[in-house]
Image (spheres, rainbow, N blue to C red):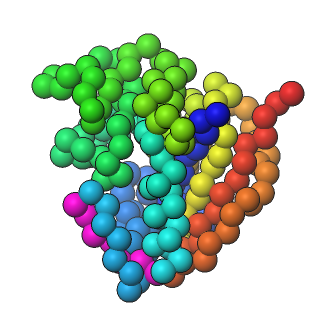
């Protein structure tokens, strides 16, 4: 069965971006503070050996992504191909101008999160589906479709900002684990399993 996971780099005080949707220079320092080079679809990152292995395993396990229209627009569609080099299902109300409804890079789904996850699972085959963006992750969790939560925890306090699971209506939520802990340079990679209700 195809797993659905979400993950984000997060500050110690629980934010994936600051209040102005920035702060990434602090959150993503670990992508450039090591000796091991990793290629990610045209982008080179330099991390610790432990983080490089973590990224390699994550990329090998991921077969498709689901993102929201806002993230797609903010990144300008990653220049036509996501850095993980996998198909991306974009949840949107309408297909953006200049884009095909479906290509080998992007599939635009206009009929809800469940449909988007189904489409991503079909594209992922026997690999996992990654969910990016806090709003989409919250919707996937609320629909009972999320299996794992991964956090790249960095030693910075942003003071205020955007949490991964904003506006979660069913809280508190207890997760199982951590099921994985990897200590990198300036980051701790954590994984948790979502408890499924009976």
- Using the rendered image of the protein, determine whether residue 188 is visible from the camera's viewpoint: yes
- Of 56 and 34, the residue lying toward us: 56
Indicate the position of residue 165 as horizontal and vertical percent values.
59, 43
Q: Image quadrant of residue 40?
A: bottom left
How many numbered marks does the figure carry? 0
- Of 134 and 119, the residue lying toward us: 119
Give the magenta-colored segment's residue range: 42-48
- Please identify the dominant SS of the magenta region: strand
**Quarter of the image that includes the C terminus:** top right
The reply to whether the magenta stretch includes residue 83 is: no
Indicate the position of residue 154 as horizontal and vertical percent values.
54, 71
- Using the rendered image of the protein, determine whether residue 158 is visible from the camera's viewpoint: no
Above-or-below relation of 44 to 111: below
Q: Residue furthest right?
A: 198
Q: Is residue 43 left or right of residue 30?
A: left
- The residue located at (38%, 86%) in the rendering is 35
**Quarter of the image that includes the N terminus:** top right
- Of 183 and 170, the residue lying toward us: 183
Above-or-below relation of 131 to 191: above
The reply to whether the magenta stretch includes residue 45 is: yes
- Of 126 and 140, the residue lying toward us: 126
Indicate the position of residue 129 as horizontal and vertical percent values.
51, 39
Q: Is residue 62 left or right of residue 192?
A: left
- The residue located at (35%, 71%) in the rendering is 38
Above-or-below relation of 181 to 94: below
Above-or-below relation of 33 to 42: below
Q: Residue furthest bottom?
A: 35
């Amino acid at each position: 069965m195809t797993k659905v996971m979400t993950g984000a780099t997060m500050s110690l005080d629980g934010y994936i971006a600051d209040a102005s949707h920035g702060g990434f220079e602090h959150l993503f320092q670990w992508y450039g503070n090591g000796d091991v080079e990793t290629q990610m679809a045209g982008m080179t990152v330099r991390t610790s050996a432990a983080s490089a292995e973590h990224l390699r395993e994550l990329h090998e396990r991921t077969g498709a992504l689901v993102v929201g229209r806002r993230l797609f627009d903010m990144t300008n569609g990653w220049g036509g191909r996501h850095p993980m080099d996998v198909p991306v299902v974009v949840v949107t109300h309408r297909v953006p101008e200049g884009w095909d409804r479906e290509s080998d890079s992007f599939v635009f789904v206009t009929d809800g999160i469940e449909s988007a996850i189904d489409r991503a699972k079909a594209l992922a085959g026997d690999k996992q589906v990654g969910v990016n963006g806090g709003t989409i992750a919250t919707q996937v969790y609320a629909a009972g479709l999320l299996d794992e939560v991964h956090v790249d925890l960095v030693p910075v306090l942003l003071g205020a900002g955007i949490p991964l699971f904003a506006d979660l209506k069913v809280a508190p939520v207890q997760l199982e684990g951590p099921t994985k802990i990897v200590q990198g340079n300036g980051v701790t990679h954590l994984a948790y399993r979502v408890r499924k209700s009976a």
